[in-house]
């Protein structure tokens, strides 16, 4: 049975009923996120906006695009997914982001920030060629506003005569208290239809004579002066780009929001932006007081130390004696760099969601003589692919890259699985790709890279997760290591299994149960020719297991070695097939899409492998 969208019902509510319903939505989101994991603070902050938005605009007729879309839970609740919401981020449930395959109300899927304005512009241009006019709205958070894509798209709007409407959710930008009253008054004037009609008539009249044109020029200069004085700098920037600015407006006052939405709905002169001041975590004191902590909520209780924190603690330990700069893209806490920043704030530089710029800047830092580190999630590093090639690898700049969340991430789903980095990095000349097998190995590789220095652009990839370790003990055991592969078990040397990186730790209880020799692969590029010369021989059965796409993955290094040396053996590859992995529990997804343990055991027993 198809669920009826709730956005029709909220249009019949008065404001008292709406505020009560807002509380109900917050409670439902909280209860579900605490159980399922998910994004909490950002969705608590968009309740009133979504209610007001869907009372003024029609999400079936109007194009509404949520940037990043991790704040679109309320959108899902109002567009026919109230009952299904309890399955959010679960396997076979609804996505934690907008998804065009899930609902007709999801006009553009997004898990990465900065896409909404470009997508809105694309919809507008596409519909324009068909002679169709619709309201097109992009909803952007302040974090996404740092994205290069957003800035590029804003710069393009006026040149293509766009009329899209942008809603900026922001709790940082504000006008000073001295001019707040004046700005509020001017905003009321600016959205007055009487004022708008008078302005158009006056403009037509002035343009009809030469003297009138001079007066119009003087008035424009006066208006610009007021605009830059009364409004904050950001509004001046928007209007200088040809984007009409309105706000800031209380983003939690439904009645006030509706007045402005009603106005911009009918505003057709140019692109416009409505600035709403919102509070992340709104309605729940603990989330309001610590919105970063409750940005993402997990129900997984663990005493394990995450690999991200291993990085943070290792860098903080080394910062006592070593000089380096570390870059991140609006992810200090997620990458563990908050641990380093707490002790050495000057060693962490957060340039926002600007991955390509970060990579290039880090390269120049290294050329200036300072060791530079870039710590970004694998899936977000994809955005910097050209910068890695053009600015780093081509110039052989030895920047150290830490690829957090490499591999299966779990409930965030296909937009966040870091299962392509081995494939897109292997093809680039001059780079090295390291794959530590456990927490101590990760810390040691990081320690070695800084202590001994690196001569090539070097990538250390590690997955989401962690281990039950004593961090002080780990730090006391830091040592210089090479990148040679490790023999884990040496049983039947007719069956050789090459396991890439942390999968050695993830499935450590399995390896002794298999009738095979297990090799822990600690470097994808370069490969360990010494180990290969020993174990890859005629009449052997070779297996590769990697938390990456099979196409372009580590397995191709082994296949090339076999072909190059004319070795007569069989090979079976385990990894991500030519498809996107859905959302779900990380371990369950690894079992189903990577390890396929039953198949592996069956192949070892029957030795019926696939020929190369």
Image: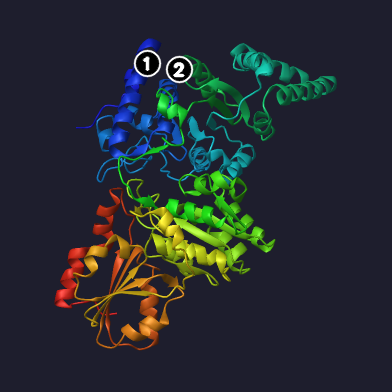
Vertical relation: 243 (above or below) 262: below
Q: Residue at x 50, y 34 (%)?
A: 138
User: Where on the picture, by quarter, is residue 404?
Assistant: bottom left
Could you tell me if residue 299 is visible in this image?
Answer: yes
Which type of secondary structure does the marked residue at label 1 adopt? Answer: helix
Q: In percent of the image, x 17 and y 64: which residue is there?
A: 598
Q: Report x, y in % for residue 306.
A: 39, 51
Badge 2 density bin: few <14, some 14–19, many ≥20, Cα 10 Å: many
Which labelled disc corresponds to residue 18?
Answer: 1
Quarter of the image where the C terminus is located? bottom left
Residue 333 position, x and y percent, is 48, 44
Q: Tag 2, which secondary structure?
A: helix
Identify the disc placed on residue 487: none
Q: Along the horizontal axis of the image, is 484 left or right of 276?
A: left
**Looking at the rendering, in which quadrant would you find the N terminus?**
top left
Q: Is residue 399 above or below residue 155?
A: below
Pinpoint residue 490: horizontal percent, then vertical percent.
Answer: 26, 78
Lateral position of residue 442 relative to residue 367, left or right: left
Horizontal and vertical percent position of residue 334: 45, 46
Who comes first in sequence, dot 1 or dot 2?
A: 1
Q: CA distance from mark 1 to mark 2?
A: 8 Å
Q: Are discs 1 and 2 less than 8 Å apart at CB?
A: yes
Neighbour tally class for label 1: few under 14, some 14-19, many 20 plus, Cα within 10 Å: some
The label shown at residue 254 is: 2
With 580 as the anchor, is 212 left or right in this view?
right
Q: Quadrant of residue 31?
A: top left
Figure label count: 2
Q: Residue at x 49, y 62 (%)?
A: 446
Q: Nearer the viewer, residue 606 or 286?
A: 286
């Amino acid at each position: 049975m198809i669920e009826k969208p709730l956005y029709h019902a909220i249009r019949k509510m008065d404001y008292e009923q709406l505020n009560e319903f807002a509380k109900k939505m917050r409670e439902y989101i909280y209860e579900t996120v605490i159980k399922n994991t998910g994004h909490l603070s950002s969705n608590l902050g968009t309740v009133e906006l979504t209610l007001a938005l869907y009372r003024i605009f029609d999400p079936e007729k109007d194009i509404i695009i949520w940037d990043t879309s991790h704040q679109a839970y309320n959108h899902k609740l109002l567009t026919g997914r109230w009952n299904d919401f309890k399955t959010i981020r679960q396997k076979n449930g609804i996505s934690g982001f907008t998804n065009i395959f899930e609902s007709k109300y999801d006009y553009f899927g997004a898990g990465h920030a900065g896409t909404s304005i470009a997508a809105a512009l694309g919809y507008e241009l596409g519909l324009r060629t068909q002679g169709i006019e619709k309201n097109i709205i992009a909803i952007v958070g302040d974090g996404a506003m740092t994205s290069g894509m957003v800035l590029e798209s804003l710069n393009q709007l006026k040149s293509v005569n766009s009329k899209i409407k942008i809603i900026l959710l922001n709790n940082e930008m504000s006008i000073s208290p001295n001019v707040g009253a004046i700005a509020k008054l001017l905003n009321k004037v600016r959205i007055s239809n009487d004022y708008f009609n008078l302005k158009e008539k006056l403009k037509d009249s002035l343009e009809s004579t030469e003297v009138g044109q001079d007066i119009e020029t003087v008035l424009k200069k006066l208006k610009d002066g007021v605009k830059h004085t009364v409004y904050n700098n950001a509004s001046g920037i928007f209007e200088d780009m040809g984007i009409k600015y309105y706000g800031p407006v209380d983003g939690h006052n439904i009645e006030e929001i509706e007045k402005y939405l009603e106005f911009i709905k009918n505003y057709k002169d140019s692109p416009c932006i409505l600035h709403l001041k919102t509070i992340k975590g709104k309605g729940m004191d603990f989330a309001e007081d610590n919105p970063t902590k409750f940005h993402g909520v997990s129900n997984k209780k663990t005493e394990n130390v995450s690999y991200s924190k291993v990085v943070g603690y290792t860098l903080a330990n080394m910062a006592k004696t070593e000089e380096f700069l570390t870059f991140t893209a609006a992810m200090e806490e997620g990458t563990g760099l908050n641990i380093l920043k707490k002790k050495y704030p000057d060693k962490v530089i957060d340039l926002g969601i600007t991955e390509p710029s970060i990579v290039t800047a880090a390269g120049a830092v290294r050329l200036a003589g300072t060791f530079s580190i870039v710590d970004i999630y694998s899936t977000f590093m994809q955005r910097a692919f050209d910068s890695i090639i053009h600015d780093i690898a081509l110039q052989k700049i030895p920047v150290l890259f830490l690829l957090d969340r490499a591999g299966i991430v779990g409930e965030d789903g296909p937009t966040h699985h870091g299962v392509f980095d081995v494939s897109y990095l292997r093809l680039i000349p001059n780079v090295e790709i390291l794959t530590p097998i456990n927490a101590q190995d990760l810390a040691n590789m990081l320690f070695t890279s800084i202590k001994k220095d690196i001569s090539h652009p070097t990538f250390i990839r590690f997955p989401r997760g962690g281990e039950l370790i004593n961090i002080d003990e780990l730090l006391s055991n830091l040592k210089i290591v090479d990148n040679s592969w490790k023999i884990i078990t040496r049983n039947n040397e007719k069956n050789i299994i090459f396991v890439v990186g942390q999968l050695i730790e993830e499935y450590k209880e399995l390896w002794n149960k298999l009738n095979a020799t297990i090799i822990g692969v600690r470097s994808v590029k370069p490969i360990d020719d010494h180990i290969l010369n020993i174990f890859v021989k005629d009449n052997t059965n070779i297996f590769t297991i990697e938390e990456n796409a099979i196409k372009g993955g580590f397995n191709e290094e082994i296949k090339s070695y076999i072909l190059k040396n004319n070795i007569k053996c069989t090979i079976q590859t385990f990894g991500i097939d030519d498809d996107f992995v859905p959302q779900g529990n990380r371990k369950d997804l690894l079992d189903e899409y990577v390890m396929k343990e039953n198949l592996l055991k069956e192949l070892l027993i029957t030795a019926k492998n696939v020929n190369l």
